């Protein structure tokens, strides 16, 4: 019995409120309950009425659950979508990768229509089929009628479903699939692949894979596919224009330092700007590191470098230093003898 027929069975439309549904069921149950109606059709009629009520309640619970959680599997006749999240690293997303996905799914119990309860012929023992019980106040002489908790106001005997042990779900079964993450997949991308499930039955199942890109320890990904990295380097190697190895999403690359430059661009070593498209660049920012204090050995080496640099005739630095010293001596020779003596005495 589908939900539309269930509303018709109770003489209602899909716009009926919960109170109208309960009132319609009670009116029909009072008329067709076998304890009150001894006609041959009464038993079958009360079963249809109870089945209609359970189907309407199940459909409304499902509608609320789907609206509250968009990651829940949905069904439309013979097709079902299962949802799964796959976490990948930046390196795997750049090159593309293959992941094996597996999980479990539990179908609704067919014996109880996912209610977890089975309805039996005869009235509820707790309320005698009335659907209500009398609750007394603490001082004893006053009481009021409340809905029977044993039958949820139905007045019909109910007990937990033996097939699902009252859970409303059939035993879980496994599914698996293999998904190819394309190069350039971004965080939040959705991929759909068919599932290979155990005993899928009448349902054709598809797994919706959501890609989740893991944060990286030193790479930063920009929207245009540029990958940024900050790299500490030896300050003396930076001054000397030495070659170093720098990380890129596909591995280490050789790069030559240039004294005075802090930002370097490595062409085509970033992230694809579009899925399976050409790769953007990798931007490396170097941070030259120098000791806070020089050792005596370092001081001596620096002094030698200064001497060789300023006295190296024939080099641009040596020629410039020699010319400057010549100008400085001529300037000093022109100074009066008393220059620089003010304030002494």
Image (spheres, rainbow, N blue to C red):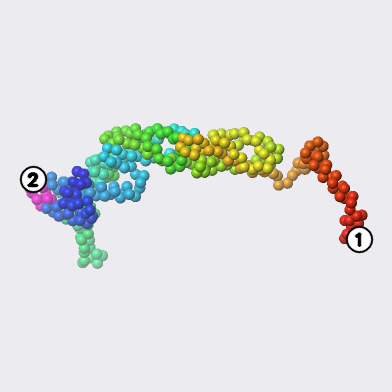
Examine the residues drawn in magenta and state their main secondary structure.
Answer: loop
Callout 1: SS: loop
Q: Residue 170: x and y, percent?
A: 28, 40
Q: Residue 262: x and y, percent?
A: 64, 43
Q: Looking at the image, can residue 35 be seen? A: no
Callout 2: SS: loop
Q: Is residue 290 above or below residue 141?
A: above
- Residue 143 lies in what quarter of the image? bottom left
Q: Looking at the image, can residue 335 be seen? A: yes
Q: Which residue is mark 2?
A: 40
Q: What residue is drawn where x is 71% and y is 38%? A: 240
Q: Residue 272: x and y, percent?
A: 50, 37
The mark closer to the camera, 1 or 2, is 1
Residue 332 colored in magenta in the image = no
Q: Residue 290: x and y, percent?
A: 69, 44
Please tell me which residue lies in front, 256 or 3: 256
Count every numbered label the image shows and give the total: 2
- Measured Cα–Cα span from mark 1 to mark 2: 137 Å
Residue 41 colored in magenta in the image = yes
Q: Which residue is mark 1?
A: 345
Mark earlier in primary sequence (1, 2): 2
Which span of residues is magenta-colored? 32-42
Pick the quarter of the image with the C terminus: bottom right
Is residue 276 found left or right of 323 in the rendered image?
A: left
Is residue 150 found left or right of 317 in the rendered image?
A: left
Q: Residues within 10 Å of mark 2 (few under 14, many from 20)?
A: few
- Residues at badges 1 and 2 in contact (C-beta under 8 Å)? no
Q: Residues within 10 Å of mark 1 (few under 14, many from 20)?
A: few
Please tell me which residue lies in front, 329 or 192: 329
């Amino acid at each position: 019995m589908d939900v539309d027929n269930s509303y018709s069975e109770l003489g209602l439309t899909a716009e009926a409120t919960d109170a109208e549904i309960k009132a319609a069921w009670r009116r029909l149950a009072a008329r067709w309950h076998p304890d009150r109606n001894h006609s041959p059709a009464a038993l079958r009629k009360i079963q249809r009425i109870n089945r209609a009520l359970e189907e309407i309640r199940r459909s409304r619970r499902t509608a609320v659950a789907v609206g509250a959680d968009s990651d829940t599997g949905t069904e439309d006749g013979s097709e079902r979508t299962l949802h799964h999240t796959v976490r990948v690293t930046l390196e795997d997303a750049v090159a593309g990768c293959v992941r094996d996905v597996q999980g479990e799914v539990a179908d609704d119990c067919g014996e109880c229509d996912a209610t977890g309860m089975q309805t039996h012929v005869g009235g509820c023992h707790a309320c005698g089929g009335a659907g209500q019980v009398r609750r007394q106040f603490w001082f004893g002489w006053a009481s009021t009628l409340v809905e029977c908790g044993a039958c949820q106001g139905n007045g019909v005997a109910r007990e937990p479903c033996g097939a699902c042990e009252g859970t409303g779900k059939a035993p879980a079964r496994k599914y698996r699939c293999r998904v190819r993450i394309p190069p350039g997949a971004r965080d939040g991308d959705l991929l759909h692949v068919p599932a290979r499930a155990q005993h899928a039955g009448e349902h054709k199942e598809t797994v919706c894979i959501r890609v989740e890109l893991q944060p990286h320890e030193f790479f930063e990904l920009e929207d245009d596919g540029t990958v940024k990295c900050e790299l500490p380097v030896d300050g003396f190697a930076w001054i000397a224009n030495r070659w170093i190895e720098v990380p890129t999403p596909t591995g280490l690359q050789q790069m030559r330092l240039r004294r005075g430059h802090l930002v370097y661009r490595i062409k085509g070593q970033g992230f694809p700007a579009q899925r399976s498209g050409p790769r953007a660049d990798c931007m490396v920012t170097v941070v030259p590191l120098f000791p806070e204090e020089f050792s005596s050995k370092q001081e001596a080496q620096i002094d030698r470098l200064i001497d060789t640099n300023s006295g190296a005739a024939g080099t641009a630095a040596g020629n410039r230093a020699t010319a400057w010293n010549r100008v400085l001596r001529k300037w000093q020779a022109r100074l009066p003898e008393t220059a620089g003596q003010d304030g002494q005495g």
